[in-house]
Image (cartoon, rainbow, N blue to C red):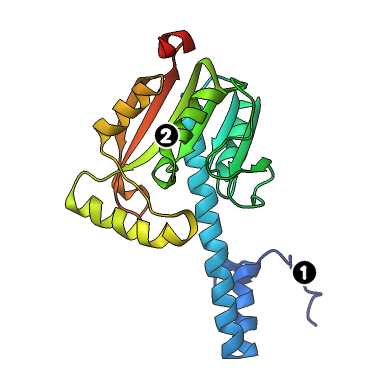
Amino acid sequence: MFQESASISPQSTPYAGRSIAPREKSLFDLLDRGPSAVVTGIQRRWRRERRRRKVGRAYDMALEVARVLPRHARVLDVGCGNGFIAHHLLGMLGGSVIGIDLDENAEAPIDYRQFDGTHFPVADQSVDAVLLCYVLHHAQQLGVVISELRRVVREGGFAVVYEDIPESWWDRLVCRIHTLKWRNRTGPCTFRLEKEWRSLFRSAGFEVVSERELSRWRNLSHPVCHRFYVLKAKDFTLVQG
């Protein structure tokens, strides 16, 4: 007589010496349903994997930013995109993080506000830090955006800037492709050299506290020279004088 079989956990099924996760078993179900189901399933998995990578990259960038900002800082994330950097940053720093972008909503659960791409919807000197992740090259009125940046940061506060730098012919090519990709949404992009950014930041009333070059291979779909700037806001009286 056979003994009564042990209950099998729905989370994993022994097969050929290993466990098959539910995600793997679903592939068999798709194969049984026919080619169209297989294509649909692959598309869903591709979107899920793409989302996972975006969230993971956002976490890494948030960690990088959190290391240069004070705990419990009030942060404004300009051009926050899906909002996951802001979401992770809030968990790391505490304080408060506001995300703003052109879209009506963000994917991540954050304090989100839509803006026109130029004027920041926050009060004068109301934040301790502003984050701009690959945003400034999209600005159609860069001078106004930089003025807004200085307006909202308190004296002694910080700005953290990621930017693409067209140092070589390869960088210029990649930046050109990026411009073609984004021009219908945000308008033409304007990329600047490292010395141009430094001059622009200083003239707007910021001290360049630190900067470093980042690997161009951080984003394989956009392999260009990247730079990471940490800026400190000077006294307004010194700027105006």
Which residue is at a point 66% across and 28% down the rendered structure image? 96
**Residue drawn at (45%, 31%) of the image:** 146
| Quadrant of residue 160 within the rendered picture | top left
Q: Amino acid at mark 1?
A: Ala
In the rendered image, residue 8, in percent from the top left (x then y), is placed at 74, 68
Q: Height in image: 167 above or below 94?
A: below
Percent from the top left, x then y, of residue 15? 59, 73
User: 10 Å neighbourhood of mark 2: few (<14), some, or many (≥20)?
Assistant: few
- The quadrant of the image that shows the C terminus is top left
Element assignment for label 2: helix
Which residue is nearer to you in this view: 157 or 143?
143
Question: Could you tell whether 228 is left or right of 132 in the image?
Answer: left
Q: Position of residue 28 (x, y in %)?
A: 61, 81
**In the rendered view, would you say 34 is above or below 72?**
below
Which amino acid is tagged 2?
Gly
Give me the disc on residue 143: 2
Which residue bears the numbered disc 1? 6
At numbered mark 1, what does the secondary structure look like: helix, strand or loop?
A: loop
- Comparing 215 with 79, the one in front is 79
**Count of marks placed on residues:** 2
Q: Which mark is residue 98?
A: none
Q: CA distance from mark 2 to mark 1?
A: 70 Å
Q: Nearer the viewer, residue 35 or 209?
A: 209
Comparing marks 2 and 1, which lies closer to the viewer?
Answer: 2
Picture quadrant of residue 38: bottom right
The residue carrying pointer 1 sits among few (fewer than 14), some (14 to 19) or many (20 or more) residues within 10 Å by Cα, namely few
Q: Percent from the top left, x then y, of residue 184?
A: 46, 62
> Where 125 falls versus 10 (above or below)?
above
